[in-house]
Image: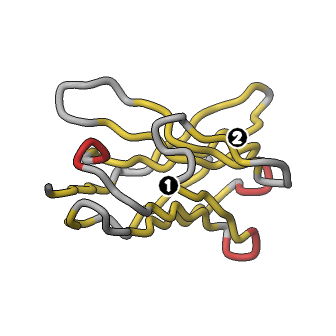
């Protein structure tokens, strides 16, 4: 299993920046991707970005491309999401995700961190 702990959410004005962190522990050697999803009130959870754990390009949702940057520190088993030029529409609970090889690919989730962008 993999355990994920997020940090870094908060309240920011439109145009501001925040950085989210997600630290993984457990079966991290089997991780395929780490990434972020978000869920706004009354909406379904949606993909934000992910990155291959052993190398490769990052993938972004079109709504955040050019504003958000995902990065990883393999030595710390941590993935980051740098969010710039934040908009009120970015307000959501952000969830860290790890996709792990366990025979098939299995998703693990963090507890979520609130990001609120005021106008």
Left or right: 103 as drawn, with respect to 82: right
Tell me if mark 2 has few (under 14), some (14-19) or many (20+) residues whose alpha carbon lies within 10 angstroms of its own: many
Report the residue marked by disc 2.
100
Residue 49, image x and y in percent? 57, 44
Q: CA distance from mark 2 to mark 1?
A: 27 Å
Residue 8 has which mark?
none
Report the residue marked by disc 1.
67
The C terminus lies in quadrant:
bottom left
Relative vertical location of residue 6 with respect to residue 64 in this rendering, above or below: below
Q: Residue at x 18, y 25 (%)?
A: 42
What is the residue that sits farthest to the right in this orientation? 55
Q: Quadrant of residue 116?
A: bottom left
Q: Residue at x 34, y 51 (%)?
A: 112
Residue 80, image x and y in percent? 56, 64
Q: Residue at x 43, y 50 (%)?
A: 110
Left or right: 82 as drawn, with respect to 113: right
Q: Quadrant of residue 85?
A: bottom left
* Disc number lying in front (2 or 1): 1
The number of numbered badges drawn on the structure is: 2
Q: Dot 1: what SS? A: loop
Closer to the camera, 115 or 97? Answer: 115
Closer to the camera, 94 or 87? Answer: 87
């Amino acid at each position: 299993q993999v355990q994920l702990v997020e940090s870094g959410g908060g309240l920011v004005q439109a145009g501001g920046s925040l950085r989210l962190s997600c630290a993984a522990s457990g079966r991290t050697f089997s991780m395929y991707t780490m990434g972020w999803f978000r869920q706004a009130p009354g909406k379904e959870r949606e993909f934000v970005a992910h990155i291959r754990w052993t190398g490769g390009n990052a993938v972004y949702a079109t709504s955040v491309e050019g504003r958000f940057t995902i990065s990883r520190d393999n030595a710390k088993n941590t993935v980051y999401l740098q969010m710039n030029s934040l908009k009120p529409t970015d307000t959501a609970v952000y969830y860290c995700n790890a996709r792990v090889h366990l025979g098939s690919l299995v998703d693990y989730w963090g507890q979520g961190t609130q990001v609120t962008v005021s106008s």
